[in-house]
Image (spheres, coloured by chain):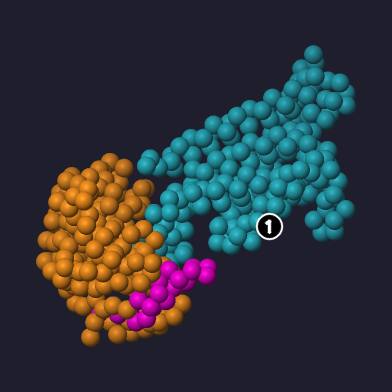
Chain colours: A cyan, B orange
Amino acid sequence: MDKLVLETLARDVWSLTLQHIWIVFVAAASATVLGVLLGIAGTRSPAVRRYSIGFANITQTIPSLAMFGFLIPIPLIGGIGPRVAILSLILYALLPILRNTITGILSVEPAVRESAVAMGMTDRQLLRYVELPLAAPTILAGIRTATVATIGTATIAAAIGAGGLGVLIFRGLASVDTLQILAGAVPAALLALLADGGMALLERRFRVER
Amino acid sequence: MAFLSFRHVVCRRGDRNVLEDVSFDVDEGETLVLLGRSGSGKTTALRLVNRLIEYDSGEILFEGNDLRSLDPIALRRRIGYVIQEVGLLPHWTIAQNVALVPMLQRWPREKTEQRVRELLKQVSLPPEEYSERHPRELSGGQRQRIGVARALAGNPSLLLFDEPFGALDPVTRRDMQRQFLQLREQYRTPAVFVTHDVVEAMALGTRIGVLDGGRLELIAPPEEFTGASTPVARAFLDTLPGRSLRN
C-alpha cells in the first residue's frame, strides 16, 4: 500500500483518538457529577430515588441511533455535532453511576451510620466522613462501567458528525475497507481496556477492609 | 433537680404505643438500668434521649430544659452513646475513632491527642500499640472498649448504653462490667443503661427500671428489686443463677 495513504491514516487515527478521548471525558465527567449528586439526593428522598432511577432506566432502553434522532430536532441542545452526541452519552452513562451511588451509600452498615449520627454529625459531615468514603469503591465501579460503555457508544456518535474514532469505522464500512474499520475499532478497544484497568486500580485504593 | 426526666412520655409507631406514659428521673452520678424483654420499649426510651426518634406526647427534660427546645446536633455531642454493634468507622484508625466528638467540636490538636492517649490507657489499650490500628484488627471486646472511649472523649454530660456488652463472651463481659464500674467511679457521669440481663442490671444499676409492653412496671434500687413482687420483675429474678428450671 501507498506510504502516503498510511501516513495520512496514522495522522487521522491520532487526531480522532484525541477527539474521542475528549468526547468520552466530557460525557463521563458530566455524568459522574450529575449521577453522584442525584444519587446523594436519592438517598435522602425516596421520591427522588424512584423518579431518577426510573428516568435513567428508560434512557437505557432507547437505541443510541434513535436517541440521536430524538435529540437533533430539539432547539438549543439539538443540531448536528458533538453537543447532541455528548448529551446522549451522558444520559447513557447516568444509570450505572446513579445506581451505584445509591447502593453504595445505602449499604453503609446501619450501626456505623447510627453511631455517627448519635455522636453529633450533621448530615453533611455524615456524607463527607462516613457515607462517601465507604461508598467510594462502589461509586467508582459505576463510573468505570459507565466510562467503558461510553468509549464504545461514542463510536456511533460519528454518525451525527461528532467526530471521534467512529469516523474511521463508518468510512471503512462505506468503502468496504477493513484497514480503516480496524484503524477505528482497535484504538477504541484499547482505550476501553486502558480506562477499565486504570479505574480498577483506583477502585482498589479506596476499598476498605472490614 | 433531676438531670434527666421523663414525664408521661408516649411514643407511637403506627397505631401501637411503643412507650406508654413512662415517667422517671435520672440524677447526677446515677446509673439507671432499663431492664426489659425484646420489644419492651427500652431501646426506644434510650433513643428518645438523643433524639434519634421523637416522642408523641409527654415531656422529656434535659438539665431542666425541654428536650425539643435544644438543638439536636449540639445535644448529641454532649451525650455519649454506646451500642451493641459498636459502629466504629471502619476506614478510620482507633485514634481517629476515639477523637470523633473532639474533632466535631474542633478541639485543638494537642488537647485531642492527649485526651485520646488518656482514654486508651483508661480502657486498657496502650496507645503506642493501638492508636494507629483499624477496627478490623481488634477483637469484639477491644472494639467495645473503643466504643466506650469514644463515648467518653467529648466529656459528655450523659451516657447512653444500649446492651453494650450483649454480644461479648461471658468472661469478656464480666471484664467490661468491672471496667464500667471503675470508669463510673472516676467520671460520675449520669447514665441510662439498657439491658435484658438481670445480673448485669443488678451489678451496674444504682436503680433498675423494669419495662414491659411500653410501660414502666417498677423502678427500684437493686436491694429492693430483689424482693420485687411485680410479674415481669419476678420473671427476670427467676432467671438468676441458682434458680432451678424444674420446679
Q: Position of residue B200 (x, y in %)?
A: 20, 58
Using the image, name the chain to which the residue with label 1 belongs.
Answer: A
Q: Residue at x 16, y 65 (%)?
A: B226
Q: Is residue B199 left or right of residue B24?
A: left
The secondary structure making up most of the magenta span is strand
Q: Residue furthest front?
A: B247
Q: Position of residue A116 (x, y in %)?
A: 38, 60
Q: Residue at x 58, y 43 (%)?
A: A142
Q: Nearer the viewer, residue B73 or B99?
A: B73
Magenta stretch in the rendered image: B3-22
Secondary structure of residue under mark 1: helix
Residue B13 part of the magenta-drawn span:
yes
Q: Nearer the viewer, residue A190 or B14?
A: B14
Q: Is residue B98 left or right of residue A178?
A: left
Residue A120 part of the magenta-drawn span:
no
Residue A196 seen in this snapshot: yes
Q: Residue at x 21, y 78 (%)?
A: B27
Residue type pointed to by label 1? Tyr
Q: Is residue A42 above or below residue A163?
A: below
Determine the image quadrant of residue B134.
top left
Which residue is the site of mark 1?
A: A51
Q: Is residue B224 above or below residue B204?
A: below
Residue B70 seen in this snapshot: no
Q: Residues within 10 Å of mark 1 (few under 14, many from 20)?
A: few
Q: Residue at x 44, y 60 (%)?
A: A126
Q: Is residue A150 left or right of residue B99?
A: right
Q: Residue furthest top?
A: A1
Q: Position of residue B130 (x, y in %)?
A: 21, 46
Q: Nearer the viewer, residue B160 or B227?
A: B227
